[in-house]
Amino acid sequence: MKHVATLTAAKLMFLAALMLFAGLSAHPLALALGLTVDAASHYWADRRFTLARFADLVGKGDFYRLGLPEAAPAGVGSYALDQSWHHLWIFVAALIIAA
C-alpha cells in the first residue's frame, strides 16, 4: 500500500508541475478520479495472485508463468503482463483526467 501511495503522490506532483508550466488545467474531480482509478488498478495488480488469476481467466496463464522460477516472485511473462496492465490503466486515467 505504501508503494501505491508514494507512486500516486509522485504522479500528482509531476502532473501538477506539468500543468503549471504548460498552462494546462483539469477539473479537480476528474484529476482525483483519474488518480484513484490508477492507484486502485495498481494496487490490485500488485497483489500478484489477482493478475495471475486474471491471466488464467483470459487464457494467458501459460504466458504469465513464462520464465517463472518457483522461488522467484516474477518471471518474464508476469513482468510483461504486469507492465501492460499498468500502462493500460495509466491511459484510462489520462483519458479520465483529460475529459
Image: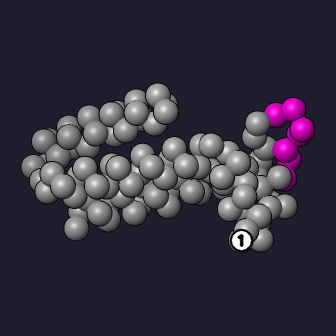
**Quadrant of the rendered image containing residue 48:** top right
Q: Which residue is mark 1?
A: 58
Identify the amino acid type marked 1: Val
Report whether residue 60 is seen: yes
Considering the image in quadrants, where does the C terminus appear? bottom left
Q: Residue at x 73, y 68 (%)?
A: 57
Q: Is residue 96 magenta?
A: no
Q: Image check: 55 left or right of 30? A: right
Q: Residue at x 86, y 47 (%)?
A: 67
Residue 39: horizontal and vertical position, in percent? 42, 46
Number of dots carrying numbers = 1
Q: Residue at x 55, y 49 (%)?
A: 44
* Residue interval drawn in magenta: 66-72
The relative height of residue 50 versus residue 2 in the rendered view (above or below) is: below
Residue 83: horizontal and vertical position, in percent? 59, 50
Residue 64: horizontal and vertical position, in percent? 77, 55
Q: State the residue lying farthest toward the right.
A: 70
Q: Is residue 71 magenta?
A: yes
**Quadrant of the rendered image containing residue 63:** bottom right
Residue 32: horizontal and vertical position, in percent? 25, 50
**Quadrant of the rendered image containing residue 93:** bottom left
Give the main secondary structure, helix, strand or loop, of the magenta stretch. loop
